[in-house]
Amino acid sequence: MKPISQHDIAEASGVSASTVSRVLTNSPLISEATRQRVREVMDRLNYYPSLAARSLVTQRTYALGVVSPFIADAFAGHIFAGADSVAAENGYHILATFSHGLSEEQDLIKRFVRERRADALIVLNLNLPAEFLANLARDNMPIISVGKPAVERGIPSVSIANGPGSFELMNHMLNHGYRDIAIFTGPTGSHDGRERLAACLGAAQVAGCTLPGDRILTGDFSSGSGERLMTELLDSGKKLPEAIVALNDAMAIGAMNVMHQRGLTAPRDIAIAGFDDIEAVDLLGLTTVRVPRHMMGREAAKLALRCLNGEIPSPSLSIIPAELVIRQSCGC
Amino acid sequence: MKPISQHDIAEASGVSASTVSRVLTNSPLISEATRQRVREVMDRLNYYPSLAARSLVTQRTYALGVVSPFIADAFAGHIFAGADSVAAENGYHILATFSHGLSEEQDLIKRFVRERRADALIVLNLNLPAEFLANLARDNMPIISVGKPAVERGIPSVSIANGPGSFELMNHMLNHGYRDIAIFTGPTGSHDGRERLAACLGAAQVAGCTLPGDRILTGDFSSGSGERLMTELLDSGKKLPEAIVALNDAMAIGAMNVMHQRGLTAPRDIAIAGFDDIEAVDLLGLTTVRVPRHMMGREAAKLALRCLNGEIPSPSLSIIPAELVIRQSCGC
DNA sequence: CTGTTAGCGCGTTCAC
DNA sequence: GTGAACGCGCTAACAG
């Protein structure tokens, strides 16, 4: 069954194809009467314009490409959902792709661009070489970074308020009266990790509490490293800290697992907090800082859409507030 | 900067546009020599054919629509990733959308179909009225169901081997020597819940172990209901079961939380197992059954692609094996 | 094997 | 206000 075309509508309503096109594009040069009539016929025949044909002439696909590193699929789901929600509000769709490694990512993007599959790109954990990005710019393809800010490279970005979030979290722990606090950090290369650590240290300092160097333990954001760090702490024979602030939830969970195995519980024996608010931690009662992934997706899509309207001076940074989520593990 | 077109390639390589088209579509009616030459020019000029133009004539978009209920975004991420992996292998892309409620879902799908945004549809938790599906069929849009099988409605489906998975899990618990086992079930309406329960009961029976009615506790797949059920068990004053089989992980986690609060640990005090293998449970050491979401996505995309090649007799069911994942909570 | 011709379904001039 | 003619970039006959 062949789909109905503009031409069919034209015939059925006794006008020309261009008139139908005009009502489709909401052209003002149309009498209300014919507009009504044509609209009716379109409804009755259940007509939608062919995107391919429209794209061909407008050079727009009404799709936003979202490319995510393969690992991040759970994380990505929320970003997609957020982006999709604003996309849908604007007649757009989300073209989702996962990349396995940097070089494949570049190929994917190149295809998106050259095939004109999408009007703009949203890239998670953007990590592309500068010259590659320059080429994209030449192709007139707006690109948005989610997660790691890339504003200095002229790319509108949306990222999390790591600083304020960590500061607030740390403050909360300090307000509980804890003074001997250990911090489980992320890998040294991590942008998020650095920001979070700095803010935690800052909060401690403001509270007149200086953390000795051996209370800053370097992990890698994996739950395994959380387990390792906690084990070291317990096996060191030294005095245990009153509280632990893990710079992400996975490490916090790892730490809690070890505690659990040793018959310790949070916050009774050691208070603990994390960062991210991944699904699991609600169930564990972990106090943490929420990274609103859905909203990040929304924000990214908004930026993308704005770029498409030429509204945005390329460099622009949108910081999503991170909300302290208080559960029981902190001692509350 | 205007994108290069087929025409540009034709000029640059001294042939006609159709020749370029032929090498693009891998037509055999081309001399190896010119093919090489044209290919070279395409590479050099970094040319990719415009999808819109191609779609317009071939009536194919090379996109697979995936629509997921909004709630399932974490779950959906893995399905997307899986579907995308086979899509990519075939030059396809994934158009992802989230629906909020059934009526919006229908609207979304209708647009997909009429605008010809996608060549086939993959629907998660398909729950569409029969007449609606009939219309889709009239529009020649293949549709695949993921999760709930809908084969009886003539729709190719991919779902999980709930039965075998649960049977194996239950067997494992029985092999541990547990005879007094409580089961936390899903909501009565749930397809998955029913299948899992039946298999558990079957396994018990085979082992010559009959579970009394008060050992079948009705939950709703939420962690809250797991907590509630466990609390009831503990507060009942009656003898505790040796083991608990929760028909999904969320309930198992809820139950573990309550145990934890009461100073009990699994498997020491009560052994426990779940179903799904969501991210959280690895960290908790929960024995469970893995639902391979990535593979389900792959399978769905394969089915969709096959439909597009006319290879599939509409009704077809693809059951993804569910793998027992043994951790510590069962007593191992 | 290759070039020429004709649309695919739509938006956009330009006349009327 | 409305219709006719043209072109977006590509594939698919039809000739040669």
Image (tube, coloured by chain):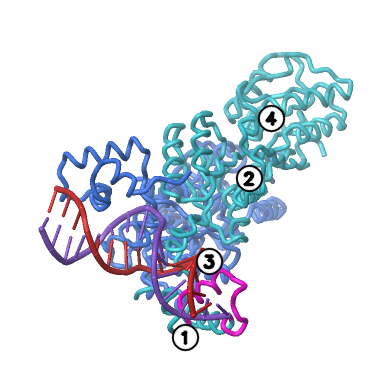
Chain colours: A cyan, B blue, C red, D purple
- From the viewer's perspective, is B174 left or right of A223? left
Question: Are discs 2 and 1 both within one chain?
Answer: yes
Lower sequence index among marks 4 and 2: 4
Task: Give the class, few, some or many, for how many residues have Cα within 10 Å of label 4's Cα (few <14, many ≥20).
Answer: many
Please state which amino acid type lies under the numbered disc 2.
Glu
Query: What is the distance, in whole Å, between disc 4 and disc 2 at their CAs?
Result: 16 Å
Instruction: Say which of B263 and A177 sits in front.
Output: A177
Q: Which image quadrant is residue A84 in?
A: bottom right
Residue at 87% of width from left, 32% of height from top? A175
Residue at 53% of width from left, 36% of height from top? B328
SS of the residue at dot 3? helix
**Residue B38 image point, x, y percent:** 25, 41
Question: Are discs 1 and 3 both within one chain?
Answer: no
Which of pointers 3 and 2 indicates the residue nearer the eye? 3
**Residue B78 image point, x, y percent:** 49, 47
- From the viewer's perspective, is A89 left or right of B80? right
Tell me which segment is drawn in magenta. A12-35
Which of pointers 4 and 2 indicates the residue nearer the eye? 4
SS of the residue at dot 1? loop
State whether residue A256 is above or below residue B183.
above
Lower sequence index among marks 2 and 1: 1
Q: Which residue corresponds to mark 3?
A: B108
Q: Which residue corresponds to mark 4?
A: A247
Q: Which residue corresponds to mark 1?
A: A14
SS of the residue at dot 2? helix
Residue at 56% of width from left, 58% of height from top? A92
